[in-house]
Amino acid sequence: MSQNPIQTVHLEEKKFIGFPVTSSFSFHEPKRIEEAKREFLERKHEIRHVVNPDEYVCPHFSSEVLFTYFFCMEVSELEDIPEGMIGFTIPVRNYVTTRSDTDPYEVLHTYIKDNGIDHNPKALALEVYQFADPEWPGKVDVFVPIKEI
């Protein structure tokens, strides 16, 4: 079992374009998420102003009944948003981050709790995948938003 060290990082504003998918926890349909991913992979070439063509990012958030997950590319400009996709900006934010062969969210939330850090539940968490090797969880960088420290 391997795990990278947990780090606290400060990320500048980021812009994304991609496909959202929303599902309820009680009636979760994994096929809907796979369909959004398939469509994203088929149409990612339509996204302009890509910052890193080797990776895709999955910002997401949840409430007590729903979650929304995005398949996106980071872009330098929110222009020329393809049909059916959305563009949005994530403001400057602090995160704790790691990569782990076990559940990285469990690792990060334990770290947050054990270190008296305040999680920011209103902000988007990020998963950064490499197109060449998108293996979950061992090859994915996970960022959990925290409040200012």
Image: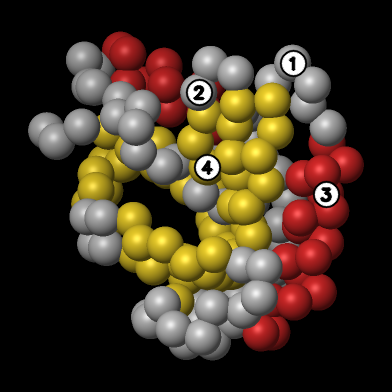
Horizontal and vertical percent position of residue 25: 69, 21
Name the residue at 41% across, 77% down: 78
SS under mark 3: helix
SS under mark 4: strand
Instruction: Name the foreground residue: 31 vs 138.
Output: 31
Instruction: Name the foreground residue: 137 vs 69.
Output: 69
Give amino acid for label 4: His
Q: Residues within 10 Å of mark 2 (few under 14, many from 20)?
A: few
Mark 1, residue position: 26
User: In terms of image quadrants, where is residue 92?
Assistant: bottom left
Q: In screen coordinates, is 147 left or right of 58? A: left
Instruction: Of the two numbered discs 3 and 2 on the same chain, state the one appearing first in sequence.
Output: 3
Mark 4, residue position: 60
Name the residue at 36% across, 21% down: 111
Mark 2, residue position: 63
Dot label at residue 66:
none
Mark 3, residue position: 34
Give amino acid for label 1: Ser
Cα separation between marks 1 and 3: 18 Å
Please say if 41 is above or below 19. Answer: below
Cα separation between marks 3 and 2: 21 Å
Horizontal and vertical percent position of residue 88: 42, 62
State if disc 1 and disc 2 touch (CB < 8 Å).
no
Q: Residues within 10 Å of mark 3 (few under 14, many from 20)?
A: few
